[in-house]
Amino acid sequence: MMRTFKKGGIHPSENKLTAGKPILDLPLPGELRIMLAQSIGAPARPVVKPGDVVTVGQMIAEATGFVSAPVHSPVNGTVKKLEPTRTPQGIWQDSIVLVPDADNPFDSSLQPRSEEEIGHLSPAEIISIVADAGIVGLGGATFPTRVKLSVPEGKRATTVIINGAECEPYLTCDEALMNVEADNILKGALLIMRATGATEVIVGIEHNKPDSIAAMSRAAERYPEIRVEALRTRYPQGGEKQLIYALTGRVVPCGALPVETGCIVDNVATAYAIYDAVYNRHPLTHRLMTVSGEGLTSPGNFRVANGTPLSSLIDFAGGMPEEAGKVIAGGPMMGRAVSTLEATATKGLSGLVVIPESQARRKPAGPCIRCARCVAACPMGLEPYLFMLQAENQVWEGMSEHGVMNCMECGCCSYTCPSSRPLLDYIRLGKQELRKKK
Amino acid sequence: MKKLIVSYSPHIHGGGSISRCMWNVVIAMLPALAVAIWTFGLPALSVCLVSICACLLTEWAINRFMFHRPFTLSNGSALITGILLAFNLPSILPWWMVTIGAVVAIGIGKMSFGGLGSNIWNPALVGRVFLLLSFPAAMTTWPTGIDSGFEGVVAATGASAPASASDASTGATLLTHLNSAHGTPSLSDYNLLDMSIGHMNGSLGEVGGIAILIGLAYLLLTRTITWHIPVSVIASAALFSWAFGGNPVLDIFAGGLLLGAVFMATDYVTSPMTPKGQLIFGFMIGFITIIIRRYGAYPEGMSFAILLMNSFVPLINRYCRPSIFGEKERRAMA
Amino acid sequence: MILISIIVLGIIGLVAAVLLFVAAKRFFVYEDPKIGEIEALLPGANCGGCGFSGCHAFAVECANATSMQGLNCTGVDAEGMAKIADIVGLAPSSAAKKTMVIKCSASCENRDPRNLYDGIHSCAVENALYQGESDCIYGCLGCGDCVRACQFGALTLPPSQGLPIVDPEKCTGCGKCTEVCPRHLCELTTEDERPIIWVACANRDRGPVAMKECGVSCIGCGKCRKVCPVDAPVIESFLAHIDRDKCTACGECIAACPRKSIEKR
């Protein structure tokens, strides 16, 4: 019996259309619009002005606090202007507009660090390199990685968990990365282990990625501290708490951080970014994204420069299909619907999924028949049907008493509801109201 | 530029729907229905049709003229109520009584609470119990001439033969015998095979034990229901039947226990939300059924047991919440 | 047999009657009859516009009041309030009548939806989870939370317009809509003999952005302020607001506004 998490969960159609596709470099667009707010926490502050010439890897906006991450230029080019750009959700936010030079070498000429130099780095030095490289959690949460690596006073990290679950349907960028860069991901994982003082690394990969499991296991043979575990394919395995339970049997207490159980969880892409920053001195300026969906003529896994418009991504994948109805930033379970393709790629964007119009609309909601499927599917052991009734009647305190704040918004409840009730919408509304009250 | 559709996640749906659940239940009931028609002949079919038509018509009329709500018949829930009600009636019940039962089931049992999803009690059982209390004689009059499994018991207990040609309208069910027969009936007095394939007397739906179990298997395979309620009802009925000196196999196969355990107690709306709650619910149904069968005035206690436990569902839900992942650990930490 | 039945039933009835009588006496709560009289005059909408939890609470408050100051039901006219004051034997207070205006005038043709929202038909949800269908993140969402909240039927929402219409005759100024509108577009203003002139826009984006977002958005150009003889318009965060106390309703600003975002009623 393969390992998995205990409570709830679903198994949506995987639809990994781009599995096994090679990684392609997306051509640079004529203009990059780099958002200043690319991580949770305070947005970065620009340190360039219009007309400045920037080189690849140069910091163009600095972090403005502990929970904040700097932003770097992915290209050699010129700063055109500082002006707002829409986010995928349609809100205007500040950005830096860069015009790349005509010929742009993809790799910078930065001198890589030698193995010996890396061997002598102290944990604090590793964390500072990670912070300066602007690395954030690439699984989608965009939590600045330096914060995660700084184990709080009085806590001890024992286990580094590398998240290769990629449980969202359609997305395959982590899989593509693991197939190609297995050894470098593990090097990044070992750096995380050193920075946090942990003693072991466990890589969790869902069973539907046999190539990745083989590649990572082969690479891990060299390192006694690293163990690769195959997990039963089940959503939301990539959730931090679920993954920790599946791999170690430890349970993160409600309201506490994973480090309470001694676990530090990082995505494979984050581990790779840490490797890249420490070994090659590359700040985080590019990332892998999956552009997928029925109707796209050439979906694939692309290496995308920060600030590339979403429309170029879609164009590279064969252009917007005629029947497209919805574009999702991220996976279809937790991603957010894109309202404008003028928006640009950010560090946290793991892909775009194009959904045909025929599947994009929700079915009309019916009454709750108390079939209890949402309760059975909730990986956090909550009662979504009750939350929806409470939110409809604005009983916010009742929602709080029933633990709505533990909801991680995985969407299993709405997915399974035979009545197509928008359970998660109401749960989110309730959470927002409760946060407002605080 | 084409307008994109926006909505909140998740953007995909599992594809389940109320009508799919309900039609699965209807399909699961077909074997039992076939056995009923085979056993009781055309009257069974007519009771069933009258019941279904009356249920659909009542639901349609109430939605149309009182709630001004759109058409909801396609989800199949009224159809299920119709079939289930018929399953709980004797095949020779007059059509107008069936109609009254159906109107009460849908009108009072379901729509008066606000329609699908809001009712407290199983609508079909509300209809049946209403009929049972209003027309006790008609509701316990079974057709004669059915090959029944109780000929043995007649001889064993010395009771007078119930099915004689001259007394055309007073058949009896096995349970009547179990209830009146003093002393412990033994399995050898009954023909289990006859009982389980419909060679016995009773309400339409309760005569085909094997057919009901086939339905259960279908419901479990299609994941329409979980095992908790049927298994706990049957197990607890067997346990208490044995504890009170009865014969567990007889108690399970005679009468409506299987019908109730598989199709009635598992009704989504009127059963608890968590596996733990469902086990308690099923356990209590089994217990109450046996108590009523042994010590009550009625030979059959399934309907009352289910209705009683339906009333306790909100309470069960309140005390059998799912445990929040990490809550125990949080308490331990604090 | 029949006799026994009659006697038994009679006794049961008698005992029950005695119990009820004792209970009624024992647990009797005195209520001021004035409360009932006042409540009969109130609309019974429980809108909360008076500041109390409902019409009954307001009636209790009136009955116990020593002065009618601060007690005003928005749902009854001055005459009605005078009657209530009469019941409790106090002098009626004169509260200014309020009415509601909507600070958005972007009907469908002025504000082409950029997206198609496919979710719960509720402004609260749409505002919380999405930014609305159009470019403007300040304007009306058009799902009609206010229409549903209005107890007096003063609001209607024609789908072709996508913007609620206020019926000034029916609006009592209770303010229920101001509570439910997630974008705070419902504004209460005093009603008197002057016509009401207001800026029907809430867009706080800079001019060029605001201009792109909507056909009738206020861009904060300040023309209204220039033409106003009494300096009633105030401009703050690229958005004009007309000071009702100063306004003489001359209408100069309406003619001057290049964006046609000032309205008059």
Image: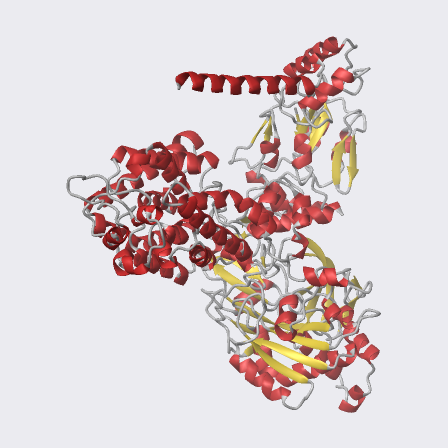
Q: Nearer the viewer, residue C57 or C2?
A: C2
In which quadrant will I find the C terminus of chain B? bottom right
Q: Nearer the viewer, residue A414 or A211?
A: A414
**Is residue A107 at all visible to an observer of this figure?**
no
**Is residue A430 at all visible to an observer of this figure?**
yes
- Hey, which quadrant is residue C241 in on the image? top right
Q: Position of residue A99 (x, y in %)?
A: 69, 68
Q: Is residue B268 above or below residue A45?
A: above
Residue occupying the point 39% across, 29% down: B65
Count of marks placed on residues: 0
Q: Is residue B307 left or right of residue A97?
A: left
Residue occupying the point 32% across, 33% down: B135
Q: Is residue A232 above or below residue B292?
A: below
- Hey, which quadrant is residue C238 in on the image? top right
Q: Is residue A264 left or right of residue A293?
A: right
Q: Nearer the viewer, residue A307 or B270?
A: B270
Q: Position of residue C121 (x, y in %)?
A: 55, 42
Q: Position of residue C193 (x, y in %)?
A: 71, 16
Q: Nearer the viewer, residue B119 or B249?
A: B249
Q: How is the image coloured?
A: secondary structure
Q: Position of residue A152 (x, y in %)?
A: 81, 69
Residue occupying the point 37% across, 56% down: B252
